[in-house]
Amino acid sequence: MQNEIKHLATQHLTEVIGWRRHLHAHPELSFQEKETAQYVAAALREMGLQPQMNFAGHGVVALIEGTNPSRKTIALRADMDALPILEDNDVPYRSKNAGVMHACGHDVHTASLLGAARILVSLKHRIKGSVKLIFQPAEEKLPGGASLMIAEGVLRSPKPVGIFGQHVHPALRAGYIGIKPGIFMASADEIYISVKGRGGHGAMPQDCVDPVLISSQIIVALQQVVSRMADPAIPSVLSFGKINSVGGATNIIPNEVKMEGTFRTMNEKWRSEAHRRMKAIAENTAKGMGGSCTVDILKGYPVLHNDPALTLRSRQWAIEYLGADKVVDLPIRMTAEDFAYYSQKMPACFYRLGTGNPERGITSPVHTSTFDIDENALLTGMGLMSWLACRELGA
């Protein structure tokens, strides 16, 4: 079976590269993936599958039924949305949609899953069960396409017993994967704080309540949530990336300052407690300085937990398929992924797909205008996902 999968991956590589390049050239933002979904569905129909459309807006789902299809079902997931980034790569498949780019590799994920579908359809007479293909919209934007697809029943009829997902990782060479059992990726919450004071002339601060000064004190005070209130054994990050005054100038103290940040951690209980403490600290700091503030925390994606048993099995199967030197053990990541919602519902394994090639200058990280991949990574992307599904089904 392993040799057959590798042969089929090689045989279909040119087609999968074509899919990936088309998707890269025609990116669509979260919740706008209409053309992408139609393109994916057309490819699935050409394989003889019957895709279901319009999950969570533009999600696509298809089922590959092997022998005894009701015995067991495994799910494979790819996300399809792009980012609001203007591409700087000078390549034939450069984005045709100005200001929108597949800078997080979702074109790679989608093309790889289409390639896996092509392989698994060829081998379905040897698959003992079924494989559910999930092409998901809106991973990049809250509330996340995963949560919406789950709410709309994507994990029912049939219900998978486990799910696999993969994500590009330019720090790893093409042909490698990285994996970690247990807690892997952080929760991610968005923090919006509005600080109000009383503006006036910058030369007469005694007549004002300075929201700029209050905001600076709030940012400093909030850092104790991580440095003094969090258990040191629980990774936590609090960062503010945007501070804007509403009005104001070199000699004008504004009436209001708005701040935006993110809080990330690896423990759901502490996450809730940290929210409470951040709100209290910000409000009390503002009040103590004569102003006021409102704190709005949008709860984002949860902690991503890789099922230990499934992930350890997958690690061994990846070694069988790629070789021990191509399977890297990864540390935890403070980035977030809405695949975490699937991991709350069933055993899940989310791993990183190497896409880099330093000799060719392919090293740019995700979410940058120069991100690209060594397209040989697609061999691993489609082949390993097919192999993992077959092994978990007992093929």
Image (spheres, rainbow, N blue to C red):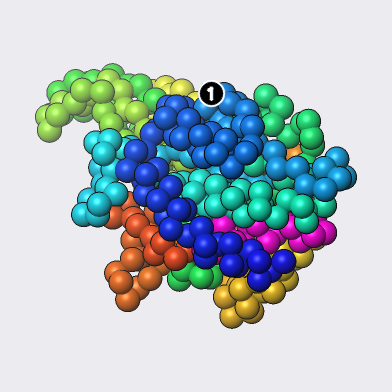
- Occupied quadrant, residue 306: bottom right
Using the image as rendered, state which of residue 178 and residue 394 is in the foreground: 394
Using the image as rendered, state which of residue 92 and residue 43 is in the foreground: 43
Residue at image location 33% in from the left, 66% down from the top: 362
SS for dot 1: loop
Dominant SS in magenta = helix
Residue at image location 78% in from the left, 30% down from the top: 157
x, y percent for residue 93: 29, 49
Q: How dense is the environment of label 1, judged by Cα within 10 Å: few (below 14), some, or many (20 and up)? A: some
Task: Identify the residue under disc 1.
Answer: 57
Decide whether residue 379 is among the magenta residues: yes
Would residue 121 be visible to someone looking at this image? Answer: yes
Residue at image location 53% in from the left, 70% down from the top: 176
Q: Quadrant of the C terminus?
A: bottom right
Is residue 289 placed above or below 170 in the rendered structure? above
Decide whether residue 118 is among the magenta residues: no
Q: Quadrant of the N terminus?
A: bottom right
x, y percent for residue 69: 82, 42
Q: Is residue 362 left or right of residue 226?
A: left
x, y percent for residue 218: 42, 37
Q: Is residue 215 left or right of residue 56?
A: left
Is residue 9 placed above or below 42 in the rendered structure? below
Query: Which residue range is magenta in the image?
Result: 378-395
Q: How many numbered marks have been drawn onto this rendered protein structure?
A: 1
Would residue 332 be visible to someone looking at this image? Answer: no
Is residue 330 placed above or below 240 in the rendered structure? below
x, y percent for residue 345: 75, 39
Identify the amino acid type marked 1. Gly
- Occupied quadrant, residue 59: top right
Using the image as rendered, state which of residue 81 and residue 130 is in the foreground: 130
Residue positioned most to the bottom? 325
Residue at image location 57% in from the left, 24% down from the top: 54
